[in-house]
Each structure stands twice: as structure tokens, then as C-alpha cells.
Image: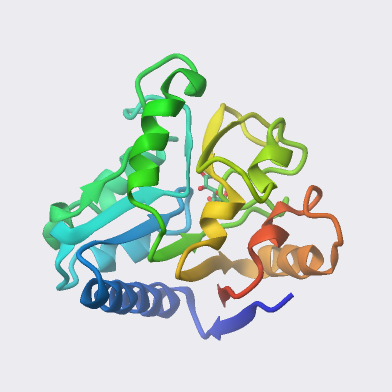
């Protein structure tokens, strides 16, 4: 595994540094192309990164932003990653960015998948991807034992895959490993001893099905703070 580990003295500093780093990578992408794209995780970790990022000077109206994965819950649910994105990132200067939706108001993700996939594909390849990880070694919604994990990890995977897993309380949609790995720049943000230990375990595991985060650990920078 070729991941680079960057350790920070504390979480606050890490979140601010990461926001600056993402902003400078987006600026570089915008200097080379008309548009740039950013994929970010939901969950409880990235909120402070979004807070800083939302205030940075950037041609946000030329940036497409999407989630790495979404939980199939309505947007007014506390568990909605879209809601997190809208309240923490899409404000201040970043309000001008274009949201690529990963949720549609249908009963199942499958009913919205074609439409959502079109939007995602139009914004590829990703300029920058930021990923999160769980202690069960999932990243995005690539969960160990998930029903469509094979498809999502395959070299010819579609951009977006609907996913159900014992470790996830609701159905999900997730970017596939192929799309995540095609990004120009990849980052993983983790905090605490348990996630660091899980990352080290994943790197040693041969089987990406047991440790799906392994599938994105090549050419990635892992950012860690206690
Ligand atoms: O919707 C989600 O759950 C995420 O996108 C997921 O992949 C997340 O990044 C990890 O589960 C870590 O979550 P925490 O940051 O809450 O630990």
C-alpha cells in the first residue's frame, strides 16, 4: 500500500489545514480547466472542514460538489448527508457552487439511480476527493459484506451504485471505487486511535471485500489526528 500518512497535533488544526489544501487543489484544477469537481464524505467528521472551506475565496460557481455517498433518507433527516452539505458547506462564498445530487425523493435508490448517475458522470473525473472511514474499514458506502460490493469494487463499475449492508442502517448510494480512484487527488480523513488501528489493519489485509477502504489506499494522503 502506498498511502502517505500525515499526522497532526490536534483535530482543529487538521480540519483547517485540510480545508486550505482542498481549496488550493481546486484552484489549481480551475487554472487548467473550465470546471473543477469535489467529492466529500458525510458522517460526523467533515463538518469543521466544510465550515472553513465555505469561506475561502475560489471561483465556486465553476465547482461541482457531490457527496462520496448518501444515506437513503429524506433531506430533513438528521442522517441526511445532503443536509449536512447544505448547512455546512453551501453557504457563504461556497453557496455559489453547483451541487450534484446523490439523493432523489423516491422510495428506493434504484428508482433514482439513472438520473443521479447522469449528473455524477457529467462532473467526472473528480478533481479532488475527500473520504471518511469507519472502524469497520468501510469508506464511502463500500461496506464489508455489502450486497453490491463486488460490482462497486470492479474495474468496470458504474459511477454510482446502490448499496445495502448490515453495517448501514438504511440503503445507500455510493461512488464506485473506480470513480474514487480516478480522482486527480485523493485524501482520507480519520480521527482517533480506533480508526488509525483499523486503517493499519486494512492495509495489511489482502481482501478488499473484508476491508473495502483498501481499494482506495493507493496514491492517497491519509490525514490523522488523535
Ligand atoms: O454517510 C456516511 O456514513 C459516510 O459518508 C461514511 O463513509 C463516513 O465517512 C464514515 O462512516 C465515517 O463516519 P464518521 O465521520 O461519522 O465517523
| Picture quadrant where residue 151 is located | top right
Report if residue 10 is visible in the image. yes
51 relative to 212 in the view: left or right: left
Who's the residue at 58% across and 73% down the image? 220
Who's the residue at 56% across and 27% down the image? 171
State the image coordinates of residue 199 (x, y, percent, origin top left). 71, 66
156 relative to 59 in the view: left or right: right
Who's the residue at 45% across and 48% down the image? 42
Q: Which is nearer the eye, 4 or 29?
A: 29
State the image coordinates of residue 40 (x, y, percent, origin top left). 42, 56
Name the quadrant of the C terminus.
bottom right
51 relative to 45 in the view: left or right: left
Hey, which residue is sitting farthest front in the picture?
Answer: 156
| Picture quadrant where residue 27 is located | bottom left
Report if residue 102 is visible in the image. no
Who's the residue at 15% across and 73% down the image? 57
State the image coordinates of residue 140 (x, y, percent, origin top left). 56, 49
Name the quadrant of the N terminus.
bottom right
State the image coordinates of residue 10 (x, y, percent, origin top left). 49, 79
Render colour scheme: rainbow
196 relative to 160 in the view: left or right: right
Amino acid at each position: 500500500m502506498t498511502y502517505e500518512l500525515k499526522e497532526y497535533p490536534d483535530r482543529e488544526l487538521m480540519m483547517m489545514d485540510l480545508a486550505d489544501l482542498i481549496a488550493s487543489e481546486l484552484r489549481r484544477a480551475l487554472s487548467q480547466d473550465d470546471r473543477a469537481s469535489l467529492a466529500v464524505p458525510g458522517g460526523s467528521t467533515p463538518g469543521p472542514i466544510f465550515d472553513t472551506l465555505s469561506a475561502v475565496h475560489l471561483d465556486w460557481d465553476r465547482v461541482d460538489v457531490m457527496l462520496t455517498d448518501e444515506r437513503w433518507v429524506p433531506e430533513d433527516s438528521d442522517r441526511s448527508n445532503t443536509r449536512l452539505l447544505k448547512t455546512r458547506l453551501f453557504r457563504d462564498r461556497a453557496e455559489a457552487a453547483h451541487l450534484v445530487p446523490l439523493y432523489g425523493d423516491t422510495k428506493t435508490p434504484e428508482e433514482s439511480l439513472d438520473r443521479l448517475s447522469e449528473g455524477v458522470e457529467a462532473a467526472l473525473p473528480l478533481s479532488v476527493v475527500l473520504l471518511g472511514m469507519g472502524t469497520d474499514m468501510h469508506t464511502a458506502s463500500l461496506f464489508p459484506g455489502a450486497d453490491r460490493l463486488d460490482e462497486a469494487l470492479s474495474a468496470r463499475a458504474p459511477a454510482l451504485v446502490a448499496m445495502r449492508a448490515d453495517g448501514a442502517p438504511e440503503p445507500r448510494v455510493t461512488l464506485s471505487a473506480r470513480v474514487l480512484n480516478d480522482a486527480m487527488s485523493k485524501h482520507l480523513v480519520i480521527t482517533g486511535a480506533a480508526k488509525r488501528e483499523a486503517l493499519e489493519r486494512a492495509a495489511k489485509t489482502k481482501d478488499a471485500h473484508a476491508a473495502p477502504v483498501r481499494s482506495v489506499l493507493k496514491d492517497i494522503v491519509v490525514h490523522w489526528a488523535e
